Image (spheres, rainbow, N blue to C red):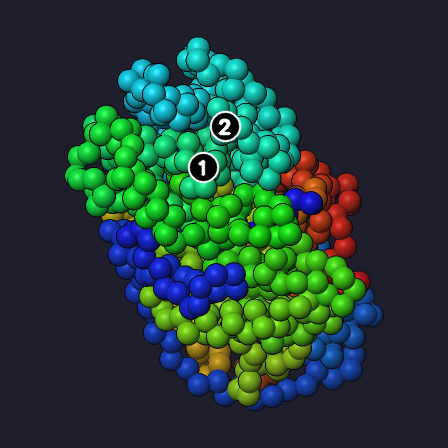
Amino acid sequence: MLLLFVAVAGCGGENEKVEQGQGEGAVFSPVPLDLDFAAYTEVPVDFTPVVKPYEVEPGLANVTNKDMFILSPEAERMLVENGFVVVPGQNREFFMLYEINSYEPVPSFITTDSMLHNYHLFFSHLLRVTEKEKLAPELKELTAAMLSASERQYAALKGTAWENAAKRNVGFFAVAGRLLDPKMPVPEQVKSEVKKELALIEKHAGIQESPLMNMGQDLAGPEAFKEDYSQYTARGHYDTDELLQSYFKAMMWYGRMTFRLKSEDETKSAVLITLALAEGDNGQKWDRIYQPTCFFVGKSDDLSFLQYQELLEEIYHEGAELKEIASGGEKWGAFIKAAAELEPPFSNSIPIFEEEIQPDRQREILGFRFMGQRFTLDASIFQRLIYREVKENSRGERRMLPKGLDIPAAMGSEEAYAILEAEGETDYEGYPENMNKLRQYIAGLDKEYWTQNLYWGWLYTLESLLGEKGEGYPSFMRSKAWTRKNLNTYLSSWTELKHDTILYAKQVYAEMGGGAEGVDDRGFVEPNPHLYARLAALVKMTREGLASRDLLEQRDRESLERLEQLALSLKTISEKELSAIPLTDEEYDLIRSYGGQLEHFWLEALRDTGVDHRSAIGDNPAALVADVATNPGGIVLEEATGHIFDIYAVVPVDGSLRIARGGVYSHYEFLWPMEDRLTDRKWHEMLDLEEAPPLAKWTEIFIAP
C-alpha cells in the first residue's frame, strides 16, 4: 500500500534550522530569514474594550432599522440569539454586496473577510506579474544553460561510472525545456525517456515509476523512484494562461523530482548539477528565481546545490573540477557519508510505501532537488497529524488525510479542537500528544519567525482571528457562533493562500455609488484592530520587499499604499468603536464608500488578466479551489471558497442598536479523485450548476438554512 506523507516551505541561509527533538514527531521551523527584501514593521494597537453588553429583543423590537431587511424566521431567530447571522447569497465578489448597500442605502458592516480577500487579490496579482515578466523568462534561460552544461558533462563522462548520471541530467533539463517550449529539440540520447516522462505529465497519470529518474538503475518495487504525475495539472492562477501553465509544469518538475541520497547514481547526478550551476552565471540565474519565490512563500524544504556546493568545497576544495570528483576514491565516499547526515525535509512529498515495507522514511526521502518546494508551517502541522506520525484510531482506521481545522487548532484555537474532537478526528493514537507538541512549539514562536516572508506573515495575520472576545467587545462577538464564524474566515483566507501558492508550497503528501438622502445609513467595522494592524504591516512589507528588487511597478506600488492606508483606517475605527469613542463624519463616509474602494482594488488586481470593467465579474468570481493534501490511494483533500454570503450583525451606533450588512466567505472542504484535481474553472461550473458539496455541519450554528 502506497502512502504519501504531507509535504511542506522558508530562504536565506540553507540548512539553518531550529529543532525540538529529532526524528518522526519532531517539530521544526526555519530560522528567521535575513533576506535583502524588506523588514516587517509592527503597527501598534492601542485600545481598551468598553462596549456595554446588550441583548436583541424578540422580533428585533429594539433594533431601529429592522424594516430595512427581510429575513426568514430562522435567520431572524439566529440574529436575536447570537446578535448576527450569515445568510447564503449569490454575490460573486465582495464589492458587489457593498455597492448594493450604498445604493439602497443600508448600513454596511465591513468585515475582516473582505479585507483579507483584498490582500489575496493583490498577492495573486503580484505573484502572477512577477512570474510572467521576470521568473518565466529567467527559467527558460536557466534551463537552456543547464541543458548545454549537462550535454558537455555527458560528452566528458562517456565510458565512465558517471555516464548514466550525466545522461539522466540531460534528460532532466530536456523535460523542463520541452515543458517551457514544446518545439525545443531533445538530445538524441534521451529522446525515449523524455517522451515517456512528457506523456505521463500530460496524462496526469497519477503515481507511476519515473522512466528518467530510474534509468540505468536496476530498481523495482519500493526501491524505484515514483512520482505523482497528477500534480502537473495546472491549477491555482496558472490554469488560464499558456505561459503560466508551462511555467507551472516546469517548476513543478524542478520542485518535485528528487535525486535521492540512497542512490549513489542519483547523487552523482545531483553533484553534476551542482557543478553546472557553478559555471558562468548559472548560479545567479537560479538565485534570481529562488529568492523572489522565497519572499513570497519560503525556503526550500529539500537539499539544494547550496548545501552540496558547501560540502564539495569542504571535502575537496574550492573550485574542484569534474575530473577530480568523478575519479571517486576516499573523498567521494566522504561526501556521500557527509551528505547523508544533512537535515532531512520537514515534510515528505514523495510517494513511499507504508512503514512495514519502508520503515526508514528519512532514508527514502532525503535527497537533492533543483528548485525544491517550500517549507510552510501549515503543511508541517498536517505532516505531524496524519499517518505515520499518528497511528490508528479505535476502529483500526488510519488518518490518511488531515483537516483544515488542524491548523487553527495547532495555533491555539480551543473551538477548532473541540470540533475535531466531536468529529472523531482526535481519536487516533498519537494525535493529542502531537497536537500538544505543536501547540507548545507554535506558542513559543516570536514575531521574527511569524514575519520571515509573506506566507508566514499571512498566517500571522490570520492568527489574530483565533482569540475569543471577552468583556467590552460588542455582544455579537461574544459567542460560540462568532468564534466559529471566525474559524470560517480563517479557513477561507487560508484557502486563498494555498490557492495562490499551490506551485511552491509542498503538499502534505470605481464607482462610489449613491443613494437616497436623509436615511441614517451609518455603518460599522468588524472591530479586530490586531488583524487590521498586522494586515497593514504585511501590505507594507509586500510593497517594500518587491520594490527593493525592482519587481513592483509604480501603479501597483500606489495601490498597495492605498490598501495599507485603508487597513490602518479600519484599525483606527475599530479601536474607537471598542473604546466607545464616536466616529467622525469622514470615517462614516469611508464605511459608506467601501464598495467602490473594493471595486477599485479588484480592477487593479485583475488588470494583468485583461479585466478592465466590472462586467468581467462572471468570469472572475471570488470563488476558488486548491488541493492541499494527497492520499496515494487516489484521493485529495480539496479546500474551496464559494459565493459571498451575507452577514447581518446587530451593532451599537450612538447608543441604539441597528442591523448592518456585510459580506463573508463561504468555505468548503471535501474529498476528490486524485486524477481530477480541481481547477478554478471546474469549481465555478460546479457552483453554477449547484453541485457544490454541503457546508461543514459545524457552521450551522451561524449560517441560516
* Labels 2 & 1 near each other (Cβ < 8 A): yes
Q: Name the residue under label 2.
A: 217
Q: Is mark 2 on a helix, strand or loop?
A: loop
Q: Position of residue 467 (x, y in %)?
A: 53, 76
**Is 353 or 37 nearer to us in this picture?**
353
Q: How crowded is mark 1: few (under 14 residues within 10 Å), some or many (20 or more)?
A: some
Q: Would you say 354 lies left or right of 375 here?
A: right
Q: Residue at x 73, y 72 (%)?
A: 422
Question: Which of the labelled discs sits on residue 199, or is there none?
Answer: none
At x 52%, y 39%, the residue is 237
**Quadrant of the drawing holding the N terminus:** top right
Position of residue 280 measured from the top left corner of the image (x, y, whole percent): 21, 28
| Residue 142 appears in view | yes
Would you place residue 209 above or below residue 635 in this image? above
Q: Given the image, on which type of amino acid does mark 2 rest? A: Gln
Q: Dividing the image into 4 quarters, which one contains the C terminus?
A: bottom right
Between the C-alphas of marks 2 and 1, the distance is 9 Å
Q: Position of residue 555 (x, y in %)?
A: 34, 43
Position of residue 625 relative to residue 232, above or below, is below
User: Image check: 584 left or right of 636?
Assistant: left
Taking 498 as reference, is 29 above or below it?
below
Residue at 41% across / 61% down in the picture?
Answer: 29
- Whether residue 554 is visible here, answered yes or no, is no
Judge by depth and name the residue closer to the eye, 117 or 491.
491
| Residue type beneath disc 1 | Ser
Q: Give whichever of 170, 579 is nearer the camera.
A: 170
Q: Which residue lies furthest to the right in this view?
A: 73
**Mark positioned earlier in the residue sequence (2 or 1):** 2
Res. 263 mark: 1
